[in-house]
Amino acid sequence: MNLELLSRPIGAAKKARARIAAHLRMRAFASHGRRLFRDDPRYDLKNVSDGFASRIDDRNDDAEILERICAAYRKAEEEERMAPEQYQPPEPWQQIRRRNLGPVITALKEQDIPALRRMYRSFYRDACSTGILGAPNGQPRAYFAPKIKDAYRHFYLSHVLYRLNYWKSITGGKHLLRDLEGPGVGNPFGVVIDGTHICVGAEYAHYCSRRLDEELGTGSATVAEIRAGFGGIAYYLLRDRPKTNYVDFDYPESIALASYYLMKSFPKLRFLCYGEKAVTGESIRSADVVMLPFSELKRVPSKAMTLTFTSHGLAALRRESVSRCLQDVGRMTAEKILLIGNRGAAELASGAGNAASFPFALHETRESGWHSYKVSGAGVGGAAGLRDAAVVEQSYIRIAAPAQRAPGNSSPRTPSDKALVLKWAPKVRR
């Protein structure tokens, strides 16, 4: 008996059952949200239709930007091939390259400006952003169709309103809805409420930028981000903190996309793309935004960054790459590190951060519920699922010297010899 042939219908049946189960969960959540928000003036299905309407911005010629991006991509791709194994992309990203990123990789390598322009001007809806962005529930046919069915609109609107309520709660109601307005680059989708287009993920990206602002305080700063995706958090940070220099470390395809998004969003800022200058303290300080491949972490000068952070970036690395990454981050960061991720990534980071040579101490830990069932609209498996869904924020501060750690004890100490651990989960409208 051919076991491979036998396994094919079994696998197809499992996928079919998974699709049916996902669809039933989607409809259940949509029904729940419809009941909960029935008296909410924001609950208008037209808000979803307006939010998903195509809005490609083709007013300006971006050929010069795209040519810089292509040149930087080719250099970054060459650098990655020569880099040690710890800096190589994990297998899931390699699979995304093979399955989804072929057209954009070809356009970048061959400097096919018209093809790259078509993809990037609608990257929110194009396969070139696979692994970073995607249609709700992974259903582009349902949401990018000329008309979205009511069940899908009910689901997405419920999802957004939960997250907007959570954003307002977790930020203390300090911000207006219009603060979530984005630059409109990349043909974003989302909802339109009170005239404000709120693209997918805007509330979380804005929250992360406010957390960074809280950590940085006043004054100028150089901030590095590990694996920034298309640059959503960076947009709000640069928009609201004009004295900030920003450096992004990521894989070449993501760096190329983020470069386009940020260069289009901030045409007056000074950008340094990879290969245009050597990576030195002076070249970093002379630019507003610096875009570098992940492997360049090993060359960044000591204490060149005021703060380094990542949002779910560690979970996307090879397991053996996390320790190497944190060693580089510890060397290049002068004051603070902010790590945001799921509990598994937080535990992995804590283990790597306990190394005797790591010059930072865990100062504060917070938990938030961005991925909980009610906030995200994604089902979780009981108490264990809730635990895994929690978002953990770890704030580290530099200590005078690693020798401050007690002999025989690998746990890091703060300068006051007392680590503060705070669990914070504000109440949300249910």
Image: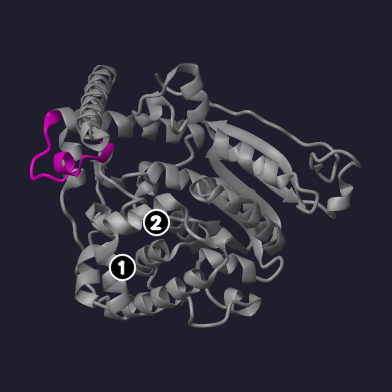
**Rendered location of residue 127, percent (x, y):** 25, 55
Q: Is residue 231 left or right of residue 148?
A: right
Sequence-earlier tag: 1 or 2? 2
**In the image, what residue type sits under mark 2?**
Gln
Q: Is residue 183 visible?
A: no
Compared to 228, does 113 lie above or below?
below
In the picture, the quarter occupied by the N terminus is top left
Q: Mark 1 Cα within 10 Å, few/some/many (few <14, many 20+)?
A: many
| Residue at 25% from the left image edge and 23% from the top image edge | 21
Q: Is residue 216 left or right of residue 67?
A: right
- Residue 308: x, y in percent? 61, 56
Identify the mark at residue 235; answer none if there is no mark. Answer: none
| Residue tagged 1 | 105
| Residue linked to disc 2 | 94
Q: Residues within 10 Å of mark 2 (few under 14, many from 20)?
A: few
Label 1 vs label 2: CA separation?
12 Å
Quadrant for the C terminus in the image: top left
Residue with the most extreme front position: 1
Residue segment shown in magenta: 137-150
